[in-house]
Amino acid sequence: MSMKRTSVLLLILLSFYFSSGNCGKVLVWPTEYSHWMNMKTILDELVRRGHEVIVLTSSASILVDPSKPSTIKFEVYPTSLSKDVFEALFMKQIKRWIYDLPKYNFLSYFSHVQEISWNYYERIRHLCKDVVSNKKLMAKLQESKFDVVLADAISPCGRPTTLSETMGKAEMWLIRTYWDFDFPRPFLPNVDFIGGHHCKPAKPLPKEMEDFVQSSGGNGVVVFSLGSMVSDLTEERANVIASALAQIPQKVLWRFDGKKPHTLGPNTKLYKWLPQNDLLGHPKTKAFITHGGNNGIYEAIYHGVPMVGIPLFADQADNIVRMKTKGAAVAVDFSTMSSTDLLNALKTVINDPIYKENAMKLSRIHQDQPIKPLDRALFWIEFVMRHRGAKHLRAAAHDLTWFQYHSLDVIGFLLACVVTVIFIITKCCLFCFQKFTKPGKKGKRD
Amino acid sequence: MSMKRTSVLLLILLSFYFSSGNCGKVLVWPTEYSHWMNMKTILDELVRRGHEVIVLTSSASILVDPSKPSTIKFEVYPTSLSKDVFEALFMKQIKRWIYDLPKYNFLSYFSHVQEISWNYYERIRHLCKDVVSNKKLMAKLQESKFDVVLADAISPCGRPTTLSETMGKAEMWLIRTYWDFDFPRPFLPNVDFIGGHHCKPAKPLPKEMEDFVQSSGGNGVVVFSLGSMVSDLTEERANVIASALAQIPQKVLWRFDGKKPHTLGPNTKLYKWLPQNDLLGHPKTKAFITHGGNNGIYEAIYHGVPMVGIPLFADQADNIVRMKTKGAAVAVDFSTMSSTDLLNALKTVINDPIYKENAMKLSRIHQDQPIKPLDRALFWIEFVMRHRGAKHLRAAAHDLTWFQYHSLDVIGFLLACVVTVIFIITKCCLFCFQKFTKPGKKGKRD
């Protein structure tokens, strides 16, 4: 459940009036970490096009940071949680998923995933309550007359409602996948697939990093990151990984913020932060070791880089399976892998040309679209503002009750007709039978 | 059946190699009349972009006319039918649909529609046989190494096949509707909606016609056409129509090639041909009287002109119902309408501002798309050539058998498991029951 919903990025709800001119007022309900990094690309472009963007965020926000210089405006609401407590709560659940979950058996695994999800939604509910019960803030928002609400569907907040009701109310759904990553399936006209909208051509690397990359010669480099939420590992796992990396001829750039593993080879450099998109777009990059987050996978697809997937939590295993099925990745299991497993996986994606070919095929498909994903995202947000919605794209099925949707009312009526007709015919037959057979019986009795 | 399929315009099948450079070789399997007029817009644009377009057409072709000057190339195959006979066969069935069908009751109506459809498909089969059994032609086509086949799905021709198989083989489906005309429903990623791709801003009218339009003053004009297949009517129906037109203050431009009706008013001018798109885009045009063909309806949507629909055959009644539901048209019944009915319908769409408002709303939706329908059609045709298909957009469901598609194999296996378990449990229980109850019974008997 949680896995499917992580892929859904945004839902757009129509709000008030479209301001004068071509510029509108956008209210944003974001989600932390990679979801925010992904959404920010759209918000920056909205601001660049002259729209006013106001992000609703709590005083405990982590990456959604109002103190950083930005052209985006922030409306910070107070919450009883502190930033440190909020971050610690997140990290506790993530570590539980990564280190504890693999120990459970099939059945208790899912009950623990459910518990972690409930923990997450309890926190979202807490934040949501701090917004909707804040009368001063709500009055201010209502007075602001926004043209559109851009909300990350993984953190629902609002009026009391259901997921199904929210889905029906959204004017437009922007999904952060495309058919390079996803498998073809039916969808409705008010859904657009904007996966990889944050990707762009690589910029030059910082001087020191470029020198390190160039020092790899013909062997090239491997880029390694486990995403915005995991920069640290247990000593044991870190050493298993470092030892595998030490055995490849490539140079390795590893985003890592923990204790330096003692098995670290001279070919591997640790960084607290990596310009991931620029590195993946570098001609010397041979492979990408990734946890399988949507952002990183799309940067690899965009630049055509084969992957070694070490999925950690949420939808990551699901994402890596997709890349594996499309022949652009090899997966290893984080909790059970040995140095040899990781080494073999790396050797495979680097030395077997089919992985690079498949990654390049995905890249060509991704880059050959009628218009770019970011422009499509912007088009639909502006469309909803321009036309005060996108009603012509909305399936009428949303207005049906569940029994109408499954035609149970029609089937019920037809069944009632059939039953009535059978009843009437039976009654008639019985009546006739009794009428015409009684005299005969009487005769016999006489 | 026929109605649904008329809306489907094109199916693109991948063929051989993509030629050098960015230009490809396109083989076209067209359909006559309005379908050809609609498809020709795409072919002209393909030629303009440097592609080589070869249209496969019979020696009996009607509107697909190789003798007309064109940058499109034609490959004419001989057929035993003459052009006159071919046209007469078409016209006979059309007249039957328009004048005879309304006389039948509900049940025999559909059997007659089926007969007309079979008549049509018998003719298509005849033409198709003339192509596939022409060995010299087939060898020539195979040697030509086309990059793509562009086929009108209403006239299927090929390998022996089924509609379902053909649907699965098509790389891309281009449907000539959009959500201004159609109602939102789920669709697959290899389907694009290019309705109205033939529409463009109005060009100036011929001098004489412009003078007539201007002479209407503030009342404006009404444009009237029954499509590319019907330019003539019975005297009785023509007089009913002419008499209604004579009673409105607007000037009327009527595409009509029959005997001049004696009730024709001085405000109505008959033309053998009308520059329909240019007239509908003229600021003086107040309404469009149409049979409800897809091309005309889209020109009216594009320019935001309210309609009076007089549906005659095929999908026309269905199309008009859509425009009526969206509040941009009033429908009248061709076979039963009186002059007053038509007059009232005309007065309604011209004088009630809601019809113009709704037509303008459809126009705004139509014109506000991320890229124009014609550019999208061209993009996907070129995409199929560039990538030798569009496999990443193809649902895997096409490869399933009908029982796999409905999961009957899975359900069957699970049912078999349940039955086996029940059988074993029952047998065990019976065995135990017999084992433990026999001594007791024996004892009693003893």
Image (tube, coloured by chain):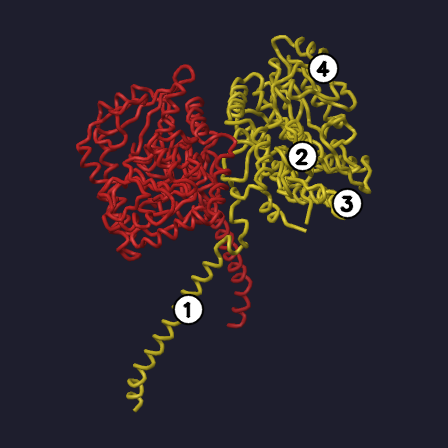
Chain colours: A red, B yellow
Given residues B331 and B228, the one toward you in this image is B228
Kindly identify which residue carries mark 4. Answer: B265
Q: Residue A409 at what x, y percent from top left?
A: 45, 44
| Label 1 vs label 2, nearer the camera | 1
Do tags 4 and 1 sit on the same chain?
A: yes
Please tell me how crowded label 4 is: few (under 14), some (14-19), or many (20+) other residues with Cα within 10 Å.
some
Q: CA distance from mark 1 to mark 2?
A: 57 Å
Q: Residue B163 at what x, y percent from top left?
A: 62, 47
Given the image, on which type of amino acid does mark 1 rest? Thr
Given the image, on which type of amino acid does mark 2 rest? Phe
Q: Which mark is residue B316?
A: none
| Label 3 vs label 1, nearer the camera | 3
| Label 4 vs label 1, nearer the camera | 1
User: What is the chain letter for disc 2?
Assistant: B
Do tags 4 and 2 sit on the same chain?
A: yes
**Vertical placement of residue A366 versus B221, above or below:** below
**Vertical placement of residue A211 versus A442, above or below:** above
**Vertical placement of residue B418 versus A180, above or below:** below
Kindly identify which residue carries mark 2. Answer: B313
Q: CA distance from mark 4 to mark 1?
A: 83 Å
Kindly identify which residue carries mark 3. Answer: B130
Q: Which mark is residue B420?
A: 1
Q: CA distance from mark 3 to mark 1?
A: 57 Å
| Label 4 vs label 2, nearer the camera | 2
**How many numbered discs?**
4
User: Hey, which quadrant is residue B434 in on the image?
Assistant: bottom left
User: What is the chain letter for disc 1?
Assistant: B
* Identity of the residue drawn at 49% across and 44% down: A357
**Vertical placement of residue A338 versus B222, above or below:** below
SS at mark 2 in the image = loop
